[in-house]
C-alpha cells in the first residue's frame, strides 16, 4: 500500500534533465514559468544530464537518491518533472521518495483546469484530464484492488478499480457527446460567416507571446491578460471593420507550447477548428525572446498537426518596445505582399501597420474608380453609400453623378447582380 498522498502541494522541487535527443529536449526556464503559473513555490531545481532513460525511474539511482534527500531537506510536497513520465515511472518514484510526483503533461493539465472559464473549456479540460488519469488509476486505488466483500458489499465480483474505470469510460463518453454538440454549434456559426463572406483572422502563437494584448488592442476587447503561460484558454471572437475589407472576425486562441500533449490537441480540436477554418492566421511571435526560432518551429509543428499548415499566414513580431532601436515596420516578399509586421502590442506602436497589412492580404482585388451614374440609377448610389464605399461625389450640369468608390470588386459585382444591372451598364471614368 502506498503512502497517503496530500490533496495539494505548493512547495515544489523541479527536475530537469538535459537529454541527448534534441527532439525530446525541454526548456528549464519554461518549467519554472509553468510551475509558477500553476501556483507552485519552487524551492530547489535539480538538474543533470540523462544519457539513457531508465524504464523504472526515468533517472538513474544516483539522481534518485539526490532527489530523495532534497525532498526530505525542504519537506517538499511536490516534485515536478520537466518530462513525460509513464504511469509506472511516476508510481516507482513516488514510492522511493515518499512525495507526490507530477510530470510535464500533468502540470499543463492542471494549469488548463485553473484557466478554463466557459462550459466548453471546462469540458475539454476534464476530458483531457480523465484520459490522462485513466492510465494512472491504480496509483490511487491499490488498497482496493481486492474484490468487494462483506455484508452489504457483495457485488458482481467487480473490483473497485474496475468499477472506477467503468465510471471513467462512461464520463468520457458523455463529455465526447457534449463536445460534439458544441462542435456542431461552432460549425453552424462558421458556415453562417462563410455564407456572409466574413473573413476570420485567427491569432496563434507560442504561449505568452502577447496574443491577448494584441487582440485587445485591435478589437478594443477586454480579454484577460497576464505575464504568465496559458493566460488565455477559451477562444474569444470579436468583429472589427477593416478598411477595404469590411467586417471581419478576430479570434484569440489558446497558446501553443513545446511538445503540447497529444491529449490536449485532441480535446481542444473543436476550439482549434477556428484556426484551421481561418481566412488568415496571425502568428504572434515574441521578438525579444532568445528562443524565438524554436518557438516558431513549435507553432508550425502544431499547425501541421491540426491541419492548418496551408492557411495563409502573416507573422507578427511583437514586443519591439523591449528591443532598443527596433522600429515598427512591414516586411514584404518579392511580390510586394506583407509577410512580417514588427510592432508592440503593449504600446500600440505598429498596430496601424498591422491593420494595413491584414487589409492588403485580404483585399487582393480592390475596385477603386469613379463611377458615372445617371439620375435614374439612384438605387445603386444608395447601395454604395450604405456600403461606405463612396469617397467623394460631384454632380455635373446634366445631373449625372460621378462617385469615387473604393470596395472589393466582388462586392460591387454582387451589388449589381442584386439590382439586376448588367456589369457593362455602369461607366468607368478616370479618377480625378
Image (cartoon, rainbow, N blue to C red):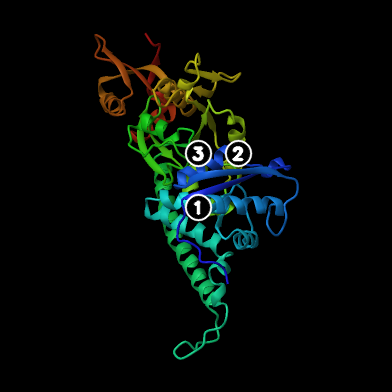
Question: Mark 1: few, some, or many residues within 10 Å (few <14, many ≥20)?
Answer: many
Tag 1, which secondary structure?
A: helix
Residue 58 x/y as whole percent: 68, 54
Question: Mark 3: few, some, or many residues within 10 Å (few <14, many ≥20)?
Answer: many
Q: Of marks 1 and 2, which one's residue comes earlier in the chain?
A: 1
Q: Of marks 2 and 3, which one's residue comes earlier in the chain?
A: 3
Q: Pick the residue in front: 293 or 78.
A: 78
Kindly report which numbered mark, 1 or 2, lies closer to the viewer in this rendering. 1
Q: Pick the residue in front: 351 or 88.
A: 88
Residue ID at (53%, 41%): 32
Q: CA distance from mark 1 to mark 2?
A: 19 Å
Outermost front residue: 73
Q: Identify the image quadrant of residue 245.
A: top left
Q: Of marks 3 and 1, which one's residue comes earlier in the chain?
A: 1
Which residue carries the number 1 mark?
A: 109
- Dots 2, 3 in contact, CB < 8 A: no
Figure quadrant of the N terminus: bottom right
Question: Mark 2: few, some, or many residues within 10 Å (few <14, many ≥20)?
Answer: some
Which residue carries the number 3 mark?
A: 207
**In this picture, residue 152 sits left or right of residue 309:** left
Tag 3, which secondary structure?
A: loop
Which residue carries the number 2 mark?
A: 298
Residue ID at (45%, 61%): 7
Task: In the rendered view, tell whether residue 190 sits above or below residue 241.
Answer: below
Q: CA distance from mark 2 to mark 3?
A: 11 Å
Residue 391 x/y as whole percent: 32, 17
Figure quadrant of the C terminus: top left
Residue 267 x/y as whole percent: 51, 54
Query: Do we see residue 326 in this rendering?
Result: yes
Task: In the rendered view, tell whether residue 221 sits above or below residue 367.
Answer: below
Q: Identify the image quadrant of residue 415.
A: top left
Q: CA distance from mark 3 to mark 1?
A: 14 Å
Amino acid at each position: 500500500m502506498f503512502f497517503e498522498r496530500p490533496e495539494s502541494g505548493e512547495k515544489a522541487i523541479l527536475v530537469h534533465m538535459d537529454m541527448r535527443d534534441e527532439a525530446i529536449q525541454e526548456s528549464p526556464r519554461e518549467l519554472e514559468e509553468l510551475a509558477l503559473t500553476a501556483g507552485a513555490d519552487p524551492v530547489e531545481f535539480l538538474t543533470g544530464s540523462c544519457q539513457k532513460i531508465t524504464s523504472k525511474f526515468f533517472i538513474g539511482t544516483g539522481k534518485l537518491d539526490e532527489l530523495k534527500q532534497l525532498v526530505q531537506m525542504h519537506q517538499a510536497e511536490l516534485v515536478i518533472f520537466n518530462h513525460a513520465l509513464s504511469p509506472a515511472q511516476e508510481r516507482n518514484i513516488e514510492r522511493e521518495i515518499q512525495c507526490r510526483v507530477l510530470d510535464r503533461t500533468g502540470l499543463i493539465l492542471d494549469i488548463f483546469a485553473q484557466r478554463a472559464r466557459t462550459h466548453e473549456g471546462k469540458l475539454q479540460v476534464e476530458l483531457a484530464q480523465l484520459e490522462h488519469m485513466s492510465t494512472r488509476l491504480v496509483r490511487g486505488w491499490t488498497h482496493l484492488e481486492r474484490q468487494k466483500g462483506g455484508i452489504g458489499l457483495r457485488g458482481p465480483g467487480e473490483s473497485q478499480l474496475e468499477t472506477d474505470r467503468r465510471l471513467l469510460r462512461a464520463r468520457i463518453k458523455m463529455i465526447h457527446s457534449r463536445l460534439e454538440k458544441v462542435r456542431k454549434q461552432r460549425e453552424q456559426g462558421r458556415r453562417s460567416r462563410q455564407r456572409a463572406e466574413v473573413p476570420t483572422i485567427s491569432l496563434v502563437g507560442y504561449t505568452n507571446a502577447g496574443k491577448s494584448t494584441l487582440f485587445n488592442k485591435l478589437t478594443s476587447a477586454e480579454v484577460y491578460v497576464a505575464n504568465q503561460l496559458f493566460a488565455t484558454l477559451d477562444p474569444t471572437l470579436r468583429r472589427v471593420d477593416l478598411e477595404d475589407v469590411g467586417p471581419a472576425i478576430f479570434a484569440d486562441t489558446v497558446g501553443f507550447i513545446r511538445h503540447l500533449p497529444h491529449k490536449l490537441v485532441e480535446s481542444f480540436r473543436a476550439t482549434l477548428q477556428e484556426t484551421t477554418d481561418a481566412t488568415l492566421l496571425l502568428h504572434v511571435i515574441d521578438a525579444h525572446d532568445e528562443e524565438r526560432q524554436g518557438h516558431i518551429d513549435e507553432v508550425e509543428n502544431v499547425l501541421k498537426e491540426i491541419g492548418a499548415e496551408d492557411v495563409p499566414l502573416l507573422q507578427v513580431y511583437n514586443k519591439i518596445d523591449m528591443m532598443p532601436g527596433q522600429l515598427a515596420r512591414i516586411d514584404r516578399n518579392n511580390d510586394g505582399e506583407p509577410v512580417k509586421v514588427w510592432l508592440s502590442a503593449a504600446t500600440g506602436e505598429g498596430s496601424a501597420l498591422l491593420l494595413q497589412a491584414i487589409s492588403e492580404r485580404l483585399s487582393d482585388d480592390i475596385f477603386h474608380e469613379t463611377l458615372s451614374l445617371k439620375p435614374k440609377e439612384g438605387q445603386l448610389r444608395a447601395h454604395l453609400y450604405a456600403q461606405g464605399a463612396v469617397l467623394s461625389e460631384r454632380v455635373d450640369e446634366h445631373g449625372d453623378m460621378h462617385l469615387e468608390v473604393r470596395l472589393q470588386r466582388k462586392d460591387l459585382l454582387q451589388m449589381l447582380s442584386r439590382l439586376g444591372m448588367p456589369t457593362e451598364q455602369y461607366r468607368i471614368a478616370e479618377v480625378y
